[in-house]
Image (spheres, rainbow, N blue to C red):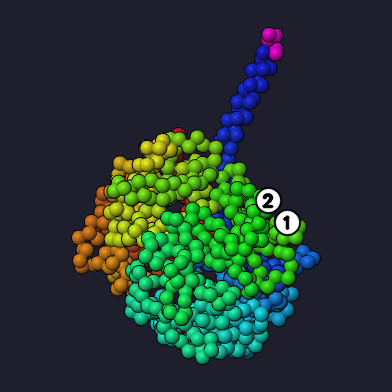
Amino acid sequence: MHSGILIACRLGLLSLLLAAALAAHAAPPAIEDFFDNPALSAAVLSPDARSLAVRVGSETVRERLAVVDLATNAIKVIAQFSDLDIGNFEWINDARLVFDSFDKSAAQGDLRYGPGLYAVNRDGSGFRQLANINSSLFQAERGARLLPWNTFMLGQKGAQDSEFIYVASPNYQALAEIDHVKLLRLNTLNGRTEAVNRPGSTRSWLLDHKGEPRLATTLDDNIVAVHYRDPATGQWRKLAEFDAYVPDPRRFEPLAFAPDGTLYVSTRAGRDTSAVHTFNFATNEVNRTAVVELAGYDFRGELVATRDQLYGINYLTDARSTVWFDEKMKAMQKTIDQLLPSTVNLISVAARSQTPWVLVRSYSDIRPSTYLLFNTQTSTLNKIGDTHAKIKPSEMGRQDMVRYKARDGLEIPGLLTLPNGSSGKNLPLVVLVHGGPFVRGSEWGWHPDTQFLASRGYAVLEPEYRGSTGFGAAHFRAGWKQWGLAMQDDVADGAKWAIAQGIADPKRICIAGASYGGYATLMGLVNDPGLYKCGIEWAGVTDIKLMYTGHWSFTSDLPDGWKQYGMPVLIGDLVKDADQLKATSPLEQAARITQPLLLAYGGSDRRVPLYHGEKFYAAVKKTNPNVEWVVYNEEGHGWALPKNRIDFWRRVEKFLARHIGTP
């Protein structure tokens, strides 16, 4: 071969190798793309499906409420504030909406106002403030009487056919202690209200298929009772009662009333997992035959219905899906899934649709939510917008539900996310422990914290350790009084499973989590020092006794009923379990933690007040020089402000790179 050609070939090969190397080490997605506020955060069809209400914002503009005319595609901003953001919103009828406000620029410690309550027509006319945002009785500029600040949207659609809505008004007797919740019928044109008579110490309300109050739950000490309001007389009668804090075989959770008046509930009915049943008001009993039953999962979901027909029921297993009772809706779902493959596509229908439009929210493990409109006549999709438009699915990591055996044989579900383009072998691993702990952790889909870690090259394992809910009563009950014990072993066994599968490099594993997950992070470093090379905890419990007793400098918002009736059974009794609580206290065991540690707390946190972190930091730094400490003074139980989210996760990025990052 001619030497010039040979040199050119070598240079060409070198260029290809350099290009491949540069591609392999391309800059990861910007941290701001994960943790900024979403640009489009909600969309709701009007009852007649002629209009679409959306909440939109940007980095420089407060979140606004806008309405799209679906006949012309014209969009109009109908409500905005110079110093507040639009919060929750709902249609009152075809032409009018109700909404509240929120200040996304303020964290928990800086919040000074309630959400307020407002109504406006879809063309921007007829604006009226209905409830105050502070304790003042009068709106100064109008002189109009307003409802007090503790007036909240009910979170239910109601009739959507008049100017009336129902709103909730909690009566507080102490911090986080609700004496009862009043229900008010509110005229959104003139602001007048009428109170609904209540059956006792009400805590929640449920409207029926006509949008009228039909069920109420009360709480007395540790007993929850469900009451039914007779539509003919307006009188209340008790349907059932059960323990509020620990599982009760008689317990059922009202879900919703179907258009024909049937009440759907969730209950176990003698099974390990809960399922959907109907309720018989003649016998005051749950009908025995299940309507929707999910193998291995407790039911979580909602009815999909118009004012005239029940179409189906949304549910959650590994991911969200819908069981359709209506053949046309089943066919529509199939068409949409063909147009949007490899995503979860959730369909919303309008109450009394007069157009061919339905709303679709589409997402996957690598794709944040996108809102679209589907035309049932033309079978076409029109995109409305994205929640996180800057995120590129091609740069995200794939996620799968996995299951592994704990050391005692209990099967533990979990989510595993692998970095994009990785071999899936011998990776640095972050074991991300969910808070609660007696809740469901995560579900299949795009999540900013998980995907951010994956974008930096880390595999992420999120165990649903025993005590987590959603996987049956036995899985939940196995976690009682197991803080720092079997619950902790489940997390460690997940890391060991990842090592055995060849996924995790045994020398590069870090444990991380918030709230209970922060507690589990600290106890993981105590119990398994050879497994975890570092720990990251934020807003974490550092001593169970502190959850009971509190501190002179700050008050926890944990309700007294939970401390009296729930915690002694599910977590541990201060007296009977004193030795166990000491042995499983990160604060008491702080000297045993020698690994690098990142601690972060909110100065205004009332769920896990700052003294949890301060006490632990003072103890651990005596024997561990490698502890990083940060306090976001204005934040509560988690980071509300993008600037703090970005700062925290940038610290996480640097911390992980130092201790388990790829050489």
Whether 3 is among the magenta residues is yes
Q: Residue 243, how many percent across, how many down?
A: 34, 74
Residue positioned 64% across, 53% down in the render: 334
Q: Is residue 11 visible?
A: yes
Left or right: 599 as drawn, with respect to 620: right
Callout 2, which amino acid? Leu
The answer to which image quadrant residue 345 occupies is bottom right
Name the disc covering residue 567, or none: none
The residue to which callout 2 is attached is 339
Helix, strand or loop for disc 2: helix
Q: Which residue is mark 1?
A: 379
Q: Is residue 644 magenta?
A: no
Q: CA distance from mark 1 to mark 2?
A: 9 Å
Can you name the residue that lies furthest to the right here? 72
- Kindly indicate the quadrant of the structure image that contains residue 557: bottom left
Residue 274 lies, with reference to residue 233, above or below; the image says: above
Is any part of residue 524 visible from this angle? no
Q: Going by the image, does 499 lie left or right of 373?
A: left
Q: Quadrant of the N terminus?
A: top right
Mark 1: which secondary structure?
loop
CB-based contact (under 8 Å), mark 1 and mark 2: yes
* Residue 151 horizontal/vertical position (percent): 53, 81
Label 2 neighbour load within 10 Å: few <14, some 14-19, many 20+:
few
Amino acid type shown at disc 1: Ser
Above or below residue 480? Residue 162 is below
Q: Which residues are magenta?
A: 1-5
